[in-house]
Image (spheres, coloured by chain):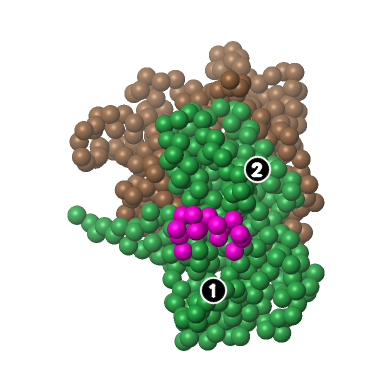
Chain colours: A brown, B green
Amino acid sequence: MSKRTEIATLGEFGLIRHLTEKIELKNESTVKGVGDDAAVLDYKEKQVLVTTDLLLEGIHFDLTYVPLKHLGYKSAVVNFSDIYAMNGKPKQITVSLGISKRFSVEELEEFYSGLQLACDIYGVDIVGGDTSASLTGLCISITCIGEGEKEKIVTRNGAKDTDLVCVSGDLGAAYMGLQLLEREKRVFKGEKEFTPDFTGKEYLLERQLKPEARKDIIELLDKAGIVPTSMMDISDGLSSELLHISKQSNVGCRIYEDRIPIDYQTAAMAEQFNMNLSTAALNGGEDYELLFTVPLTVHDKVSEMKGVKVIGHITRPELGNYLVGRDGGEVELKAQGWNSLNE
Amino acid sequence: MSKRTEIATLGEFGLIRHLTEKIELKNESTVKGVGDDAAVLDYKEKQVLVTTDLLLEGIHFDLTYVPLKHLGYKSAVVNFSDIYAMNGKPKQITVSLGISKRFSVEELEEFYSGLQLACDIYGVDIVGGDTSASLTGLCISITCIGEGEKEKIVTRNGAKDTDLVCVSGDLGAAYMGLQLLEREKRVFKGEKEFTPDFTGKEYLLERQLKPEARKDIIELLDKAGIVPTSMMDISDGLSSELLHISKQSNVGCRIYEDRIPIDYQTAAMAEQFNMNLSTAALNGGEDYELLFTVPLTVHDKVSEMKGVKVIGHITRPELGNYLVGRDGGEVELKAQGWNSLNE
């Protein structure tokens, strides 16, 4: 029998790296290929940003509690978020759907209405796609194309020693929203109507079911004349993303637990679930906030920026990646992010 | 209960049209959106072409008899074919995979080696993607980005009365290859090794398992200084594609049965299967040949072109779309193409 290595032994990122490490770029128009939030292509004047996301039923979403309109909205927005994370602007998407017979035209209309709503709000055109039957669940593949200015595109590999580490918004709420929905799903199991009372937890649900991409932050940074030294969006969890930036920039980082922005509802829910709040904020995925680094010289500017918080700083690589706790103790950051291939 | 329309009542194209008809293009950079082989985006100097394809196990391929390396090759090539069909050049692809646990790393390497081989041969870079677990079968989504010159991009809507209708290569072989593989699969059902004898039928298998995109034809046309008035690739069957061109160009067509190019192996196999040969050539999918129209004035040039055959001509729309039989009788063309949503 031939050699067999289980995918789990490599993990998702390991697998991608393994499969793509021998790829050599050939075209002059290919500035950056595999390995960042989006690929960078040089078509003169503006650079073209391309990103793609695959969403599979039962893996990325559960139609028991995810309305199709919200799913359409979210499917588009998570792609826009990748383009913003390059300091670019999403312009077009293509949408491919694999659909089983249990879906009706009306349900697909619902999905498309959410997709279109997101596109209208963010100024994006749907320019193509593919629709096919599926033997099993719903399969969604979206590719987003955006534009960026050559001198202003931000990748993951530019963080420098002494840079400030910043995040937008707050973290952990989308994860708490998911926990809440999963719990209610168990409670309502066997019943036909899924109508739990979510009063006082609306923010958590909104963060999970209808996230937004931080177009506003990209615009604020531009207005302030700041180009981050590195940036990515937080989809797998803060810890995981920080380690990406550290690795690709060849630096280390110190993050302060008491600086991590957390919403009141997230904190209340963590207590109710008896979960560690920082763990949820560090490792809960799907926040779609921006994580970026800026030079120390713009400290005053970013500190004043609405919706942005400085949570730590970049160090030399030999100092590693640590979370500094409220008591001053240091805990090494580990990627425990949401890894669908290991589940 | 709310209204429920089954997808089958609309069909694949009807569904896409239904879902996308209300989309309005907003960006100056969006020249052409939904409705052709690829979207056209204007990023100055060169125009950017984007196309995407979704391939699902059990719908588009059967791993009983499709080697993963061939599947990787074909997944890439079918996308390149769409870019060539716009008279463009494929430059980059993104690859998203949904993978169930039954696949090993080696099997995915096989898939990628086929993908990479196609990219090497056609001069394309793999620039991104997404990899995820799948609860069921293999799911492949590829997006291809290519470049085209503004004045030379060819869409489906430019065919004019008296234009010549041309096709490259020969038709029906990929369909016959599929029939052959399906028959052998039934024969070998229950046995562990799938090793039938395909001597004398190699061409049919190659056309089904490892198709090529007609880069050579695009280069020949360019060298001859010919820009087709309309073009598309034949993926769903000649009849279906001819009707697309007729509808979008607001014309009719006459195609001559005795002019349709068919390989010897295709003809022999049709006889063996007791199938109508013209039906197979007209409606069998996956040929990935080019169907295009040119002005009557270049008749001599295209007639001399290797690998190109003139099969008929464009008429005024009121004359309809007809196949002229060997006996001179006319049969209206119908789209009986390979429609995965109706299966």
Viewer-proximal residue among A53 and B272: B272
* Vertical relation: B30 (above or below) A264: below
Residue A1 placement: quadrant: top right
**Is B272 inside the magenta-drawn segment?**
yes
* Vertical relation: B253 (above or below) B199: below
Amino acid beneath label 2: Leu
Which range of residues does the magenta coloring cover? B262-276
Q: Is residue B17 left or right of residue A5?
A: left
Q: Which residue is mark 2?
A: B115
Residue plotted at (25% across, 39% down): A194
User: Is mark 2 in CB contact (under 8 Å) with mark 1?
Assistant: no
What is the secondary structure assignment of the residue under circle 2?
Answer: helix
Residue plotted at (41% across, 27% down): A267
Residue A268, percent across and down?
Answer: 37, 27
Secondary structure mostly seen in magenta is helix
Badge 1 density bin: few <14, some 14–19, many ≥20, Cα 10 Å: some
Q: Which residue is mark 1?
A: B257
* Chain ID of residue with mark 2: B
